[in-house]
Image (cartoon, rainbow, N blue to C red):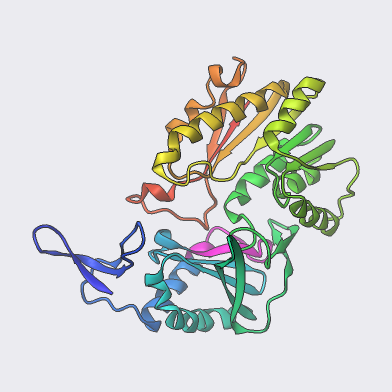
Amino acid sequence: MRVVRGPDGDACGVAVIDPDSPLAARIWSPDPSFRLDVASLRARLEAAIARRSVFLDEARTTALRWVHGEGDRMPGVVVDRYADVLVLRLDGAGIAQHLPDLVQALEAVARPRGIRSIALRSTARGGDAEAEKLSLLWGEPTPDEIRVEEHGVPFVVDLARGQKTGAFLDQRENRRRVGALARGRRVLNLFSYAGGFSIHAALGGATSVTSVDVAAKAHVTAQKSFRAAGVPLEPHAFVAADVFRYLEQARARGERWDLVISDPPNMAPNEQSRPRALSAYRKLHGACAAVLSEGGIFCAASCSSHVGLEDFLSTLDDAALGRADLRILEIAGAGPDHPVLPGFPEGRYLEFCVLA
């Protein structure tokens, strides 16, 4: 760690240094005497876990984020809990140097809470391709799949091959909202991945749910979750297809849905890609509106940190949607286990808008 100083030479704080990263210095404390060790890591972990206990019932929600990087003043560190397994992700070589202390601190707080294994999720290169690798750090071997609950709704999470740490936990509260909106409606879930919105919609009373994603393997996981929740696969459909092409064909067939959910992957990985991302959002949202029935509900999401809320809302105006009957009724973000510091706007990356 290094003391970071301002132009006047005064200390700004203590930071983990990672010169090869776009974020070369990540401040851990404004106190120049701060030491990043097992004791300080354990204190921050305990504070993060206690913060979540106020908002989430871990008896009914067994998949949640324990540590959310800068939001928990642990920059570069993400820890997700899946039942009795912790999955850790590190951002940058700087914080990776502190992995032994972090594992020791995690073990100390995890063992009393019934955790049986801690694993590291990292990106490994093989030839010209990148793959996600899960490495055991402590405890028993981790299963490839694990069953968890989200507000009492069971899910199957693919720890070995799933994206991020296995699942997208930040949309939890928005998935529950979709479940409340779905009763008696035909639902279209775009970029459905492992079917989180789909299963909430089905349990919420949707007459049918069509899940569309280019990844056929993700549908396999989604169907396992349907079975775990006791939801018959009929009359629901799982379509492996490019979303833009699917919407074009559905419009040509005259198909309409009463509730359309669009939750695409990050379209703006950097600032340079922002204009292209905004154009893609406008095209996507227009295609969604074209298959939305009159009186229908449209839920549009963005996880692109380089696309701010106002810019995202501009892709939902009348011109983009090609219709003037939709209004923004609700705007939400990530759940309470994804806290954000007021001075760190980049942390407010997730937008979820409900239009009707």
The residue nearer to you, when weighing 15 against 179, is 15
Side of 334 where 23 appears, left or right:
left
**Quadrant assignment for the C terminus:** top right
Q: Position of residue 235 (x, y in %)?
A: 90, 40
Compared with 88, 246 (above or below) is above
Q: Is residue 259 visible?
A: no
Q: Position of residue 216 (x, y in %)?
A: 77, 50
Q: Residue furthest left?
A: 8
**What segment carries the magenta color?**
51-67
- Choose between 319 and 352: the one closer to the eye: 319
- Residue 65 vertical position relative to residue 278 in the rendered view, above or below: below
Q: Residue at x 71, y 63 (%)?
A: 158
Q: Residue 40 at x, y = what percent?
A: 36, 78
Residue at left offset 10%, top offset 63% = 9
Q: Residue at x 69, y 62 (%)?
A: 60
Q: Which part of the image, by quadrant, shows the N terminus?
A: bottom left
Residue 121 visible in the snapshot: yes
**Residue at image point 20% right, 72% down:** 32
Q: Quadrant of residue 297?
A: top right
Extreme residue toward the front, this view: 127
Q: Position of residue 63 (x, y in %)?
A: 64, 63
Name the image quarter holding residue 30. bottom left
Q: Say above or below: 134 vs 269.
A: below
Q: In this view of the protein, which residue sits in the foreground, 94 or 147?
A: 94
